[in-house]
Image (cartoon, rainbow, N blue to C red):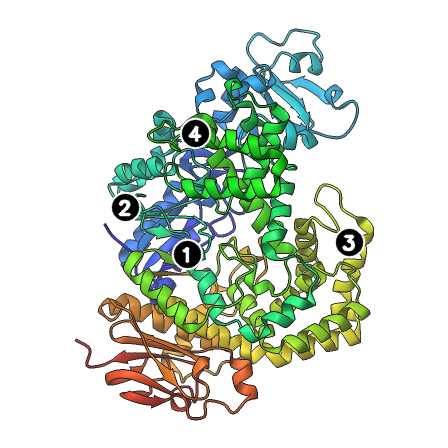
Amino acid sequence: MLTPKSTYRLQIRSEFDLHRAAALVPYLHDLGVDWVYLSPILTAEKGSGHGYDVTDPTTVDPDRGGPDGLAALSEAARAAGLGVLVDIVPNHMGIETPADNAWWWQLLAEGRRSRMAEAFDVDWDANGGRIRVPVLGDGDDELDQLAVVDGELRYYDNRFPIAEGTAHPGDTGAEVHARQHYELVNWRRADTELNYRRFFGVNTLAGLRVEVPWVFQESHSEVKRWFDEGVVDGLRIDHPDGLADPKGYLEDLRTLTGGAYVLVEKILEPGEKLPTDWATEGTTGYDALADIDRLFTDPAGEHELTQSVPVAPFHEMIHGTKRGITDGILRSEVLRLARLVPASAGLDADTAADAIAELLTCFPVYRSYLPGGAEYLADAVRDAQVRRPDLADTLAALHPLLNPFLDGPGELTELARRFQQTSGMVMAKGVEDTAFYRYSRLVSLNEVGADPSIFSIDPLELHRRLLERQAESPLAMTTLSTHDTKRSEDTRSRISVLSELAGEWTGLLGRLEELAPIKDPTFAPLLWQSLIGAWPLSRERAHAYAEKASREADSSTHWTAPDEGFERGMHDAVDAAFDDAAVVSLISGLVDRIRQAGWSNSIGLKLLQLTMPGVPDVYQGTEFWDTSLVDPDNRREVDYDARRQVLTDIDFGALPPVGEDAHAKLLVVTRALKLRRDRPELFTGYTAITSSGEAADHVFAFDRGGAVTLITRLPYTLAQGEGWGDTTLELPEGHYTCALTGASVTGGTVRAADLFSTFPAALLVQEDAA
C-alpha cells in the first residue's frame, strides 16, 4: 500500500478545475508536498462550490475538468513523484435538480417499483407509496402553479418526471400531480413529514443505500476505474457515520481499490477510539486539531472567561440543543424510528417517539457500531432515565430493541441500524451547528471534532497523546484547517491569545457592548472574538459571517424566521467596527497587542502539526497567514502566484521575520514538508524532550528520531514577564542544524533563550543521525 508523508488539500471547482490543479503540481512539489488531496470531483449540482452534492457518481464532473482533467492532474503528479488522494461521498446524492440526477429522476418517475427504489432510503409506507418532495412555497394555491410542459411537470423552474400513462389532454398540473409516485409539499413540512433519509437536515441531499451490492458497484464504478488504471492512490471517505454498515462498506472498498490508503471523516469524542476492525488507516485529523489547539490555551484564563459569559455548562447546553434538533429539523427521522418499534413491544407511539428523541439527545458520541459501542447506548439509557423518569419504563423496553446483542448473539434489525445512522445527525446538528455558535467563552475551542468544555491540555498530557498516536495510528491524518472548520488555524491562534489576558478581554467586551450593542450576551462574545481573530477583513465578509453565525446559533434569530430587529442591530454593530472611531480604536488596539503572539502561536502549532506523528495535511493557501471564517469564507480563491514568488525568495534569501507578510509561516511549512518527504528516517519514533527553569511551561519539544521540534507556547505571557531567563532543554546528544534558521546546535543542556533568539520555533536536524 502506498502511503503519503504529507498531503495538500485543494478545493476543486469550476473556477479552479483539475487542469489548474495539474498546473499547480510543480509548486506543490517545490513546497515539499508528497500527495495532492482533492475535494470531491464526481459530477455534482451545477454551480456547486464544494462537490458534496453528487448527481452522477459514474463520471468526473465536466465543470471540474472532467476525466481529461483528472488524467492531466494524475500525470503531472506522477511526473513530480506525488500521489493523489480523492474525497468521495458514499452517503448521499444531490437531488436539488432532479433532471440532472438520472437515478433520482427514474425513482420519481417509477416509484417503489423502480429499480432505484432499492438505491434510495425511502419509507414508502409512510405516505401511501409516494415520496414527499418539499419544494412548494407558502402560498395557499401553490399546487395551482403546476403545469405540464414538454412531457414534464413544472413548478416554476423546477422540473419533475411524469409517470407513463398518468397525463391526459386537458388535465391540470394539479390533476397530473395527484397521480405521481411523488407528492410535492410545502418546504416547511420536511422536518416532520419527510419520508426519505437526508444528509442531516438538507432536503436536497438524499441518502444512498450503498450497503446494497449493486448500488455500491454502480455508484463506485468510476472510483474503481481510478484504481484499475492507476490514476488515484487513496481515498478520503465523507461521513461514514451516515452509512448503514461503515465496517462492511470499508471492507468492500478495500477489495475494490486493491487495498489502497483510505481515511475516514470521523469525529471522535474525548476518549473515544476508532473501531480497530475498520479497513482504514485512521481519521482525517479533527482529533489531532483539538489536541494541538489546547496546548496554546492558557489554563489561567479559564475561570474568568467562564464567568464572563452567561452560558450553561457545555454538556447541559448540548442536551438542550440536541433535543431541539430531535424535536425540530430531524423530527421526521425520529418518527420514522418510532414507526419501526414492533407492535409486540406494547408501546404508545407518541411515548416511544419521545423516548427515542431523548435517547438520541443523551447519546454521548456520534454513533455506535453494534455490537461494538453498546456501552454508549447503555449510558444514554441511564442518562435519559435520570432526566426523564416518566419515560423510565419505555426506555427500558426500547433498550433491547435498539441493541439486539444486549443479551447475547443477535441480528441487527432495521430499527437498531437506523438509530445508529440517526444519532450522528443529531450530534452534528445539535453540537457543531448550534451549540458551537452559543458557547462563547473562548471560541477558538469551538471547532469540529473538539469539546469546548475542555479548555486546555498541559504539555505532559499532549506528549502522552502523541506517543499514543505514534503507536496506534501513525498513518492517520493530522489537520489544522479544512473546508469544514469554523475558523482557520491562524484565526484560532490569535483568539487563543485572549486566554492569556482574560481580564482585559472581558473588560473590553463590556465596553464594546456599550458602544455597539448586539443585545445577545452569549452571541456578542462569539461575534467579536471571531472578527478580532480574522481582523482585518472586509465589511462584506464580516456581515456575511455575522448573519450565518447568528442564524446557526438559532437563539436571537433563525434561518427560517429571521428576527429583522435583532439582525439590524447586529449589522449596525458590525458597521461600527469599521465606522465608529471608538469601536475601531478598541478593536485595532487589541489586535495590535495580540497580533505578534498570535503569529507565534501559528508558527508553533503549524510546526507541531507538520512534525508530530501522523500524516500532516496543509489546507489550500494556509502556507500563508489565513484568517478565514466558516464556509464559504474558507473556500476563497488562493493567490498562488504570490506564494510561488515567496517560496523562490525564501530559497535564496535570509530568514524572514515573523510579521505581516507571512513569509515566516511559508518557511516553516516548506522546510518541514521537505524534511518529512526527503528524510523519512528522521520521523520514525517519538521521545518527549524535557525543559526546566522559570519559563519551562512555555516550551514544548520532542524528538522524532533525528528531527527535533521545539516551539513556544503562551507567548503573550512570556513576553510580559522576564522572558526565557534560565530555562533550559535537554536535547539528545549529537550535532544539529536548524532547518529554519540554519543555526548549529550541540546536544545536551541548551538554553531556551539561545534556541529562540531569532524565531519562536526550531526544527533541528541531527547531522550524525544513523
Question: Can residue 706 be seen from the camera position used here?
Answer: yes
- Residue type marked 4: Arg
**Residue at numbered disc 1:** 285
Residue at figure coordinates x 40%, y 85% from the top left = 654
Q: How far is mark 1 from mark 2, CA to CA?
A: 19 Å
**Residue at numbered disc 2:** 260
**Residue at numbered disc 3:** 567
Q: How far is mark 3 from mark 1, CA to CA?
A: 35 Å
Residue in the foreground of this view, choosing between 407 and 367: 407
Q: How far is mark 3 from mark 2, CA to CA?
A: 49 Å
SS assignment at label 3: helix
Instruction: Give the mark toward the camera: 3 or 1.
Output: 1
- Residue type marked 3: Glu
Q: Say whether disc 1 or disc 4 marks the residue closer to the N-terminus.
A: 4
Q: Are marks 2 and 4 in contact (CB under 8 Å)?
A: no
Q: How far is mark 1 from mark 4, CA to CA?
A: 26 Å
